[in-house]
Image (cartoon, rainbow, N blue to C red):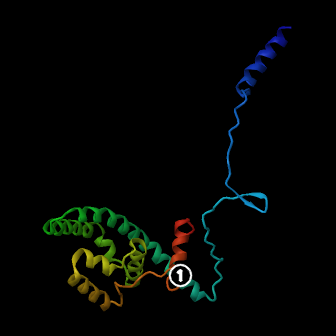
Amino acid sequence: MMRILLLMIWGCLFLLPNARAQEKDTVHYLEAIRENGDTLPHRDLDPILVYPRKAFKSRSVERRYWRLAMKVKKVYPFAKKAAELMQTYDARYRAANDPKLRRKYLKAVEKGLFDEYGPQLKKLSISEGRILIKLIDRETKHSSYELIKDLKGGVSAFFWQGVARLFGNDLKEEYDPIVEDRLIEEIIFYIEIGMI
């Protein structure tokens, strides 16, 4: 008799934590569309980009693609950081109403950025610089020429455009994700989902 009582107590101790009162049901409404008297559930989904698996025409095309991928992976963080810093600095720059304060602020920011990122950016190749110019346009929605012109003036923008032209680049070049820079856009997609 004592054994049965102990077994019942032991069983209750282990089963009590699993015993719960009935939870009140909550009603979850789903968006729906009525068509021809029928109610069909409806939910908008975010678009999903689908890129076909790469089947390269030749080994040289594959090597060029992966070289481009490594270059984009190297400069993409700089472009993202540039867009982030641009938002921060632009608000402070526009807040200063006095042109002298703006120039002073711009010089201080420029010196800080050159000290922090200058050595890394100087190591970029010409083709990496060209990709960086396009990615800055992609991230900030403004060409590098427009950014320099807005911040430093037209003469400075003209000077840096001339320097860029000497090395085969163009600061006015815009990012075209549909046609010209389709591969770069695809590579960025793969970088963001962690496949590259």
- Picture coordinates of residue 156 (x, y %)? 22, 82
Q: Is residue 73 left or right of residue 78?
A: right
- Picture coordinates of residue 44 (x, y %)? 63, 61
Q: Is residue 31 left or right of residue 129?
A: right
Q: Residue 80's image quarter? A: bottom left
- Residue at 26 percent across and 79 percent down: it is 149
- Picture coordinates of residue 178 (x, y %)? 53, 81
Q: Residue 118's image quarter? A: bottom left
Instruction: Specify the farthest residue to the front.
Output: 37
101 w.r.t. 121: above or below: above
Q: The C terminus is located in which quarter?
A: bottom right
Q: Tag 1: Cα neighbours inside 10 Å, few (<14), some, or many (≥20)?
A: few
Depth order, front residue of 124/139? 139
- Picture coordinates of residue 51 (x, y %)? 62, 75
Mark 1 belongs to which amino acid? Answer: Ile
Depth order, front residue of 166/94? 94
